[in-house]
Image: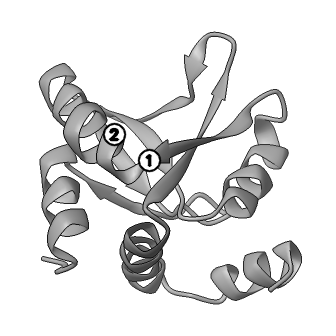
Amino acid sequence: MSSQALIDANDRLTTKQRYQSFIEQARKAQQVWTLSDEQGCLIIETGDEKVLLLWSEQALAEHWASKDHANFKALAISLSDMTEKWLPGMANDGFDLAVAPSFAGEGTIVAPLDLADELSSGKIK
């Protein structure tokens, strides 16, 4: 599937469908994608929450960055690093995750340890 076809297909999904697809694709590929620059990963503040954005595909991360964050690049994170290092650290630091946000910014906000459970079990709560 081309990058544009992937982006178009993703845009047609509901927030819940994008989240389910993220879990399935992340488990299949054994990696996830976020955005980073020289200073580190892009963290977005949504009211009271600070969230790290995650996608299952590089093209989706890059497409999202093209809107307002063109200086950020897609960063691949292995699923084992995400579940064993990143998510426990984020839980300790009080960060949440915005999983599979659409180009319009709609995504599922999830606590790090909940995401770790869902990525390891494949079962969505």
Between 107 and 60, the residue placed more toward the observer is 60
- Residue 55 located left or right of residue 119: right
Color style of the picture: one colour
> Which residue is found at the position 69% from the left and 12% from the top?
38
Between 94 and 77, the residue placed more toward the observer is 77
Question: Picture coordinates of residue 83 (x, y %)?
Answer: 24, 46
Q: Quadrant of residue 91?
A: top left
Residue underneath mark 1:
78
Q: Residues within 10 Å of mark 2 (few under 14, many from 20)?
A: few
Residue underneath mark 2:
81
Question: Picture coordinates of residue 98 (x, y %)?
Answer: 41, 52
Amino acid of disc 2: Asp
Q: Residues within 10 Å of mark 1 (few under 14, many from 20)?
A: some
Please, what secondary structure does the residue beneath circle 1 have? strand
In the rendered structure, are the residues bearing label 1 and label 2 in contact, judged by CB atoms less than 8 Å apart?
yes
> Which residue is found at the position 31% from the left and 48% from the top?
80
Question: Picture coordinates of residue 89 (x, y %)?
Answer: 21, 26
CA gap, disc 1 and disc 2 = 5 Å
> Which residue is found at the position 13% from the left and 24% from the top?
92
Q: Quadrant of residue 60?
A: bottom right
Quadrant of the image containing the N terminus: bottom right
- Residue 71 located left or right of residue 10: right
Quadrant of the image containing the C terminus: bottom left
Please, what secondary structure does the residue beneath circle 2 have? helix
- Residue 3 located left or right of residue 42: right
Question: Picture coordinates of residue 24 (x, y %)?
Answer: 39, 79
Amino acid of disc 1: Ser
Q: Is residue 119 above or below residue 123?
A: above
> Which residue is found at the position 76% from the left and 34% from the top?
69
Can you tell which mark lies on residue 100?
A: none
